[in-house]
Amino acid sequence: MTESKSTVSGTPATHVRMQGALNLALKHALAEDDRTLVFGEDVAKLGGVFRVTDGLQETFGIDRVFDSQLAEASIIGMAVGLALHGYRPIPEIQFDGFAYPAMNQIVTQMARMNYRTRGAAPMPITLRLPSFGGIRAPEFHGESLESVLAHVPGLKVVSPSSPNEAYQLLRQSIADPDPVVFMEPKARYWNKAEFDPHVPVSDYLPIGRSRAVRSGKHVTLIAWGAMVAKCLRAAELAEEDGVEIEVLDLRWLKPIDVAGLEESVSRTKRAVVVHEAPFSGGLGGEVSSIITERCFDSLRAPVQRVAGYDVPYPSGALEDQYLPSVNRILRAVQRVLEYRRG
Amino acid sequence: MQREGLILAYSPLRGQEAAQIGSGIALDLARDFAFPTYRELGVAVAMGVDLVGYLASYLGIWHGGLYDPMASRFGSINAVVSGSVLHAVGWAKGAQLSGDGGVAVTYFGDGASSEGEVHEAMNLAGIDKLPVVFFCQNNGWAISLAAERQIAGGTVAGRAAAYGIEGVQIDGNDVIAVLHATRQALARARAGDGPTVIEAMTYRAGPHSTSDDPGRYRSLDDEQKWLSRDPIASFAERLRAEGIADEQFFLAASAEAARAADAVRAGLAALGDRPGEELFDFVFANPTATLQEQKHAWQESTHD
Ligand SMILES: Cc1ncc(C[n+]2csc(CCOP(=O)(O)OP(=O)(O)O)c2C)c(N)n1
Ligand SMILES: [Mg+2]
C-alpha cells in the first residue's frame, strides 16, 4: 500500500489511495476471521489487475487467498458452496461486465438461498466488483450494473466514493450476513485522500445510510461512486455563483436511504440525481420516485436526472461524451433552480 | 504504437505468430468464417482483414473495430473470454442446414477453456457433428494464471474424446504443422465428419496486454526459454536450411513488412477524431424516439 504522511492542522493524517484502503480492509478482515476467503481471477500471484489484493496471498497463504480459474459462474457458484460450508467468501469478479457470465449464479442462487431455506443457509458473501467507467478500457470494462443488481431481491449493493468509505463499507459488507455486491469505482482507485482505519466501528454509519459530503441549502445532488467527486466539483463551481449545493453520497444502492433523501430534499426543496448508468431504467428513476413520494409538497421543481445515454458503454474515444460532465450537472442544477410552476 | 500513445491497451500476439498465421491462411475466404478473441491480429493479417479497421479498436474508436466482419469472414473483436465460441457452433449449424460447405473456426485460449460455454459448445458440436474447428491457442498463460492451474487433465485436446470429437495437440510454434492440422480439420468438417479440437501449444512471449506486468507472476528464465522456440526465427532458419529462401528473400520480406506497417500507421493517423454523434449510432436498426431525444440533448450540451 502506498501511504504518505502529512500533518493537517496539527493532527497526523494518512493519505492513501482507495486501492490501498480496500487492500487494508481485506487484510484486516482476513486477519480477524479465519472463515474469510479471497479468490477470483488473478487475485493471488498478480495481486489483482488493480492490485487491490496485493500481498494477501503472501500473508495469509494459498488456502485463504487463491487464484480462480477463468470461469465466472464457477467463482460465484463456489462462493455459494463455501458459504453453505460455513465460510465467508470474498470473491472478486475482475470487471463489471464479466459479472454477466455469473449472473445466473448471482441471481438464482446467491441472492435466493437465504429465502429459499427460510434462513437456514445465509449467504455472507461479499462480491467485489470493479465497476463503472472512466478509464478508457475495452468493451465490458466500464459497465454500471447497479440498477440490474439492486433490482434483485436478496442482494445488497454498495459503492464507496473515497478511501475512508471504501475501508468502512468493505468491512461492513464482509461482516454482514447477507450477500453484498461491492461496486468499486475503478476511476477512483488511484485518488489519494485522508484516511483513518482506526475509526471505531460504533462510529460507522449503519448499512443503508447515505452521507452528506457537502452541505448546502439550495439544491441536493445525489450520486454514488465516481460521480460523487464530479458533483463536488460542480458544487465548488456553483458556489462561485452563490448557489449552495448539498452533495449526498448515497453509498448504499440497496437498501436506499429513504429517510436521508427525505431529510435533505425537504430542506433544499430541489434535487438532481447523477449516475453513469444509462438513463432509462437507471437507479435515478428509483431515487426520483422516492423523493417525489416523500417530498411532493416541498418540491419546488421536478427531480432532474443526469445520466449516461441509452447506449452501450462506448469505446475510449467517446467516453467523455457519454459520462455525465460537470457542465451537464450544472445545467440540471440551473433547470431546477429556474423552474417555475406553470 | 502503444508506447507512442497512439494505442490505449493492446494484447500483443508476439510468440503466437505461427499458430495464428498457419491457421488463418488455411481458411477458404469464400465459405469459412473465423471467430477471433482480442489477440488475433495474426489471423486478421492472414485473412486479409483491413488492419486499420482492426486496430481502430485498440485506438478506442469503436469496440469491435471499423472493419466489416461479415465481408471479412472474420468476426468482430470480442472482449468477453469465450464469448464467441458458441457463435461458431451456431454458425456451423447454419452451414450444416444450408449445406454450403462452410466451416467455422473459433479461436480461444487456455484460460477460456475453463468457461462453461466452451464445454457446452463442444458437446453441442459433437452431438450434431457440426462443421466447426475449436482452435485453442494454449500460450501457457491466462494473464497471471499458468495453464497447469487452468486445465484439469493437462490438455484441452484431450477433452475432445469425451465429446466424441477429434482432438489433436500440435506444436503451435511450427507454422507448417499448424497449417496441416488446420487443413485436415477443415477437410474433415467439410466432409461431414464433424468438429476437431486443435490445441496449438505456444507461448505468450509478451505481456497479457500493454498494461500488464508479467514480472509479478513469471520469471525471466521462463521467458528466456521461449526464445529458442521463437516461431518466426525457427521458420526462417528452416527456410534457409532447406534452401527455399535466400538473404535476398528475407531483405525483401522485411522491407515489405516495414512498408505495410507504415501504411497501417498512416491509415490510423488519418482516422483522426471521430464524430461524437457516433455515440448514438447502431444501438438499434432504427433509433427510438427516446434515443433521438437524447442525441438532441447531447448536441445541445456540446454547443455551449
Ligand atoms: C468473461 C471474461 N472474464 C474475464 C476477462 C478478463 N480477461 C481478459 S483476457 C483474460 C485471460 C484470457 O486468457 P486466455 O483465454 O488463455 O487467452 P490469452 O489472453 O492468453 O490469449 C482475462 C481473465 C474477460 N475479458 N472476459
Ligand atoms: Mg492463454
Image (cartoon, helix red, strand yellow):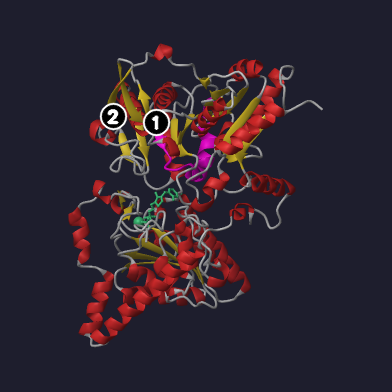
Task: Specify whether disc 1 shares its chain with disc 2.
Answer: yes
Query: Mark 1 is on which residue type?
Result: Pro
Tell me the quarter of the picture where residue A67 sits: top left
Query: Mark 2 is on which residue type?
Result: Glu
Mark with earlier residue (1, 2): 2
**Residue sitting nearer the eye, A244 or A72:** A244
**Residue B248 against residue A161 in the figure, above or below:** below
Q: Is residue A286 visible?
A: yes
Which stretch appears magenta?
Answer: A89-115
Q: Secondary structure at mark 2?
A: strand
**Residue A281 against residue A193 in the figure, above or below:** below
Residue A89, labelled with which disc?
Answer: 1
Q: Residue furthest left?
A: B221
Q: Residue furthest top?
A: A202
Residue under label 2, please give it.
A3
Q: Main secondary structure of the magenta part?
A: helix
x%, y% of residue A178?
49, 24
